[in-house]
Structure formats: C-alpha cells, structure tokens
Image (tube, grey):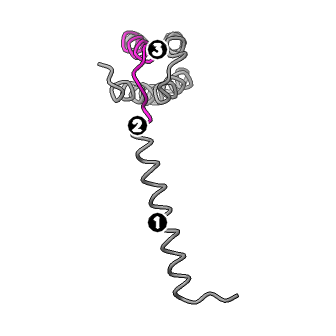
Amino acid sequence: MSLNKRQVLIGGAVILVVLVGLAVGRSAREEQGAGPLDAPAAQACSDFADGYRDADTPTTRLALADQVSKSAAGSDNEVIADRVLAVGRSANDSDAEWESAADALTQACRDAGWT
C-alpha cells in the first residue's frame, strides 16, 4: 500500500492538531494544578514563613522542613506538597539550593492564595 502526498499531508496535519491539543490541555492543567489552599497547605505555608528566617543552619533547616512536612500532610494541594518535599531535600544542601527551594515553596503558597 502506497501513500500519496495528500494522505501524508493530511496525516501530518492530524498529528499536529493532536499535539497542539495535548500541549494546550497540559498547560491548562498546570495552571489549575496548584490546587486549593486547604487547611494543611495553609498551615504549612504559615509554618514555613514563620520559621524561615531562623533556619540558617542545616539542623534548623531540617527541623523546619520536618515541621512543615507534618503540617502539609493530608493536603490536596499537590504543588505545595511537592515544594515542601523539595525544601526537605535541600535542607542539607548549599544555601543557594535551600533558598531556591524556599522561594519555590513561597511562590506556590502565594499562587494558591496564601498571604
């Protein structure tokens, strides 16, 4: 079975439309993906904001990350939960990595409506 030019072009156009549709759908999900600022997420955001300034050593960072992780348990907000985990993973890393994770968590909190 041989394909002619027209069939190849139609097939390519269909594939392009499907890919664009998937990209748009994914983008829309990511924007909505922050999820609600439920009570556990709000508590985690508040706990982190309250303790961030004093978390200046790996030990205090780990303690803060542990507290924030406990607060976030049960949250339906996947973005905040992911950022909380990243904060925990970076607690023992360089200042730059810790600050980057902290900024990402703070932004996720703000994006969800926390003030």
Answer with mark 1 or mark 3, whichever residue precedes in sequence: 1
Contact? badges 2 and 3 (CB < 8 Å): no
The image quadrant of residue 21 is bottom left
The circle drawn on residue 17 is 1
Answer with mark 2 or mark 3, whichever residue precedes in sequence: 2
Q: Quadrant of the C terminus?
A: top left
Residue 76 drawn at (x, y percent): 50, 23
Main structural element of the magenta stretch: helix, strand or loop? helix
The image quadrant of residue 66 is top right
Q: Residue at x 42, y 14 (%)?
A: 48
Q: CA–CA distance between discs 1 and 3?
A: 40 Å
The circle drawn on residue 40 is 3
Label 1 element class:
helix
- Total numbered labels: 3
**Callout 1, which amino acid?**
Val
- Tell me if residue 73 comes above or below residue 110 in the rendering: above
The circle drawn on residue 86 is none
Q: Which residue is nearer to you in this view: 63 or 6?
A: 6
Residues rendered magenta in the picture: 33-51
Q: Categorize mark 3 by other alpha carbons within 10 Å: few (<14), some (14-19), many (20+).
A: many
Label 2 element class:
helix
Residue 38 drawn at (x, y percent): 42, 18
Q: Which residue is nearer to you in this view: 78 or 104?
A: 78
Which residue is the site of mark 2?
A: 32
